[in-house]
Amino acid sequence: MKKGFTLIELLVVIAIIALLSTLSVVALNSARVKSRDARRLSDIKQIRTALEMYFDNNQTYPTVVSSSTLGGSNYACLTSSGWTTTVGCTGTVYMQNVPDDPQGVGTSIYKYTVGGTGSTYTINYVLENGGAKEATQSSME
């Protein structure tokens, strides 16, 4: 009698290994989504803190000129002069590097708008596990 594994036994083992690897990949992707969402919430809280410090000194929130997308090359720094690019970070700096969305594509960006006479602001952002959200000077969804 020969010793060894039959073809059926090998196929069963391969199927079990494939199933376990699929489950681990799904769990890893879920953890990545949760991690990006946690970073988004942290980013928005940091931006809100910088905006409040700016408001305390200027009694108004910084205005935007053209694009309202935060981070990257648009508004990468918050100084006493308002939103500037990284090159323009001089004077009183409230936020050296304004974060942008971890994915930064499509609707996954931080959009900042100022309301009224600079007395209110809104930051719109999207969570992968929660949809579109909005942060204002008084609340954060």
Image (spheres, grey):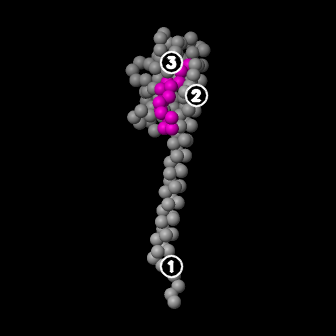
Residue at horizontal 45%, vertical 26%?
A: 111
Q: What SS does tag 2 mark?
A: helix
What main secondary structure does the magenta stretch of the protein show? strand
Crowding at dot 1, Cα within 10 Å, few <14 / some 14-19 / many 20+, comes out as few
In-front residue for pair 72/106: 106
Task: Please say if the residues under marks 3 and 2 sit with CB atoms less than 8 Å apart.
Answer: no
Disc 1 target residue: 5
Residue 128 magenta-highlighted: yes
Q: Is residue 85 left or right of residue 59?
A: left
In-front residue for pair 117/74: 117
**In the image, residue 75 lies at what x, y percent?**
46, 26
- Give, as a single range, the part of the protein colored magenta: 123-137
Disc 3 target residue: 121
Disc 2 target residue: 45
- Residue type pointed to by label 3: Tyr
11 shown above or below 19: below
